[in-house]
Each structure stands twice: as C-alpha cells, then as structure tokens.
Image (cartoon, grey):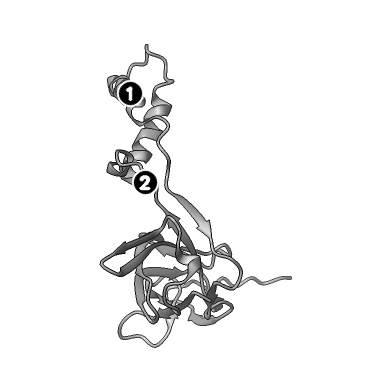
Amino acid sequence: TLYHVKTEIFPPLGTEYCKTGSLCSLEVSITRLVDLSEVDRDEALTESDGYCTTKLMYEVVDNSSNWAVCGKSSGVISMPVAARATHKVHMEVMPLFAGYLPFPDVRLFKYLPHHSAHSMQLDADSWIENDNLSVDKNVDDQADSSSIRSRGSLHSAASGEHKGLPMPRLQSFSSGQVFNCSMGMQILVIPSKDDHVLEVNIT
C-alpha cells in the first residue's frame, strides 16, 4: 500500500451536527506510507537533489446525490515520495438530505504530465479554451456574431501550433495501492429548522 486516504466532515462552527442546506467542511488527508520504490519510477516522478516528488490528482464525487460538493472538487497536488508525508485538502460540502449519510467518494490517480518542452507552456485552461475554439471554427462564416468569427480566426492561426501536442493523462492505481479508511463511513445530518412539514390526510 502506497497511500492512506482519510476523509473527515465537520459541522459549521458553533454547531454540533451537520444540517441540511448548511455548508460543512470536508478535509481529505493523503498520507504516503512508504519511501521511494520501483513502482514510483514513472513519468510523474520528479527528482531534484535527492528529493523526489510525484504528481497526484484527487477527485471528490458523490454518485448517490446526498451531498453537493461546493467549489473545486478536484485538483493536482505535488506529493513528496517519503514515508509519512501528508497533504491535506479542504473544501465545502452541503448535505441535501437528513439521516445517516455516507461520505462522498475520494478518488486518487497518478497524474502523468507530457514532457514536450513547448507544450508544457500550455496550462489546462489553454486546452479548454482551444477545445471551445475548435467548436466555434465550424460555425457558418455568415454568423451574425463577430466575436464568434474572431474566435474562429484565432483558432485557425493557432491550430497549427497546438495541434497534435500530447495531453496530460491519468493512471489508476493498482488494487491495494491506495487504502481509503473512510470508505463506508457515515455521518448524522439533522433536518434544518427551516424545513416545511406537509401533512396529508387520507379519507
């Protein structure tokens, strides 16, 4: 096992329990359990003066729709490849229902960057922008929006420069390499006092 992942959810300050519709704090702790090993020697590994780091991508998702993940739910971190090294991520979540709710899922991937010297100058936002531009390029030239035409011409000028550059990619860890100790855990969420009670009489 390479990494230990622990998730904690804290109620708002001054309250004992999480309430529906209220923002709660979620903390994800990612801890490295072992020193550098052969399985770490890949494209994500960076070594400088004997100090090694690797790139990891985390993602917080809730497929059961019990939580609303507010703000940034994923990101890339630089993790020291040393035993007991820990990285903590904080975000806010909002419970949508009352009861004992399971924690959101936390997924961890290897983030393998591309090594083209030129392409490393482009960040993720540049790729997203270029993807949007490629859509606009197919719009009819007679479109009324001049902004669409200008964005299309911008892509035409840059397409030869950016086309074919490799994208960073994600690689899943092998079974057993990541241990999520919070998987299956639940937390009590109480109803908000603002909830309305609907009484139905059946005759």
Dot 2 or dot 1, earlier in sequence: 2
Mark in the foreground, 2 or 1: 2
**Left or right of 151: which side holds 62?**
right
Q: Against 135, is 196 above or below?
A: below
Would you say residue 76 is visible in this rendering? Answer: yes
| Percent of width and height locating residue 107 | 50, 65
Q: Categorize mark 2 by other alpha carbons within 10 Å: few (<14), some (14-19), many (20+).
A: few
The mark total stands at 2
Q: Against 144, is 134 above or below?
A: below
For disc 1, the marked residue is: 148
Foreground of the two, 165 or 4: 165
| Percent of width and height locating residue 30 | 41, 74
Q: Residue at x 49, y 71 (%)?
A: 196
For disc 2, the marked residue is: 115
Mark 1: amino acid: Ile
Residue 105 marker: none
Q: Secondary structure at mark 1?
A: helix
Q: Categorize mark 1 by other alpha carbons within 10 Å: few (<14), some (14-19), many (20+).
A: some
**Left or right of 175: which side holds 54?**
left
Q: Residue at x 37, y 76 (%)?
A: 82
Residue 84 position by quadrant: bottom left
| Percent of width and height locating residue 20 | 45, 73
Q: CA distance from mark 2 to mark 1?
A: 33 Å
Mark 2: amino acid: His
Q: Against 127, is 158 above or below?
A: above
| Percent of width and height locating residue 35 | 42, 77
Q: Residue at x 28, y 21 (%)?
A: 150
Foreground of the two, 148 or 167: 167
